[in-house]
Image: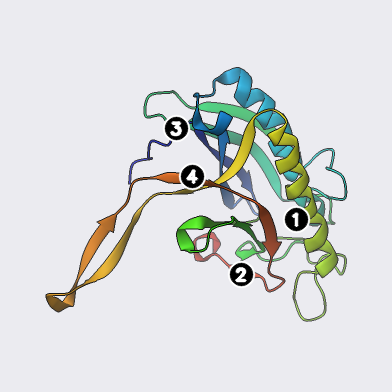
Amino acid sequence: MPLPVIGGVVRAAVVGKTQGGGPWVNVWHFMYADGASSPGPTEIDAMHALFVRFYSGSPFAGGTPWLTACATSTTTERVDYTVLNGTSLGYTKAFAAAGGGGANTSPAEVSPVITFRTNTRGRRYRGRVYLPPPASGASQIDAQGKLLQSVANVVTANAAGMRTAMAAIQWKHVVASYGKSLHKDPNDKYDKIEVTWTPFATEVTAYTMDLVLDVQRRRKA
């Protein structure tokens, strides 16, 4: 479906590769100036410098970038930014980084998930990103195949630090809600009705990570 129009919101798609060359993409959304104005290249450049630190580079206080937990064969290539105003052209920012957690990786489809939480209940007010696979060493994964709690703690702390730093330059991490759902047809129990809603964005207030690793089928060879 086409991208929505949400005032002041930018879609940020981080693009990279896992070991063997399989692609991965993480999609985030950010809002500038509470939606009062549409950001341009200058504002996106400032936000980009903070955003990429979630993955690599200088950590925020108490945090560790995610690629630190990934194998050296896991890389990032770029971030594609789209202003969701229905008219702006896209911006592509180079972002070349690699993992630092050792030579051996978990399978490409293995995905630790970071969940974005807001102050409103409901599925339309939560988001999540399937991060690229961690390295397979004992510094990231325990004997049961779960992500170490210590790793989850520093990654969510880094996300929280990113969010705080962005607030100082009028950016907010948000959950953008748009799409469609299927409801039961009250007149036909065998049919469903497609329902859409006006797109909107809600500020993220907290981050959590489940230690049980998920699987993304589209990453399987």
Instruction: Identify the residue position indicated by label 4 in the image.
Output: 201
Check the image and report above or below for 101 versus 174: below
Scheme of colours in the image: rainbow
Foreground of the two, 154 or 108: 154
Q: Where is residue 197 drawn, in percent x and y?
A: 32, 51
What is the number of the mark on residue 214?
2
Q: Mark 2: which secondary structure?
A: strand
* Image spot of residue 145 (x, y percent): 75, 76
| Residue tagged 3 | 7
Q: Nearer the viewer, residue 212 or 219?
A: 212
Q: Amino acid at mark 2?
A: Asp
Please tell me whether mark 1 or mark 4 is closer to you in this view: 4
Tell me the kind of residue under disc 1: Thr
Name the N-terminal-most of marks 3 and 2.
Answer: 3
The alpha-carbon separation of the residues under discs 3 and 2 comes to: 33 Å
Q: First in sequence: mark 4 or mark 2?
A: 4
Q: Nearer the viewer, mark 4 or mark 2?
A: 4
Checking the image for residue 73, the label placed there is none
Note whether residue 101 is visible: yes
Residue depth check, mark 3 versus mark 2: number of the one nearer the observer: 3
Report how far apart the C-alphas of labels 4 and 2 lie in the structure. 26 Å
Residue at numbered disc 1:
156
Residue nearest the observer in this picture, 155 or 130: 155
Rate crowding at label 1 as few (under 14), some (14 to 19) or many (20 or more) other CA atoms within 10 Å.
many
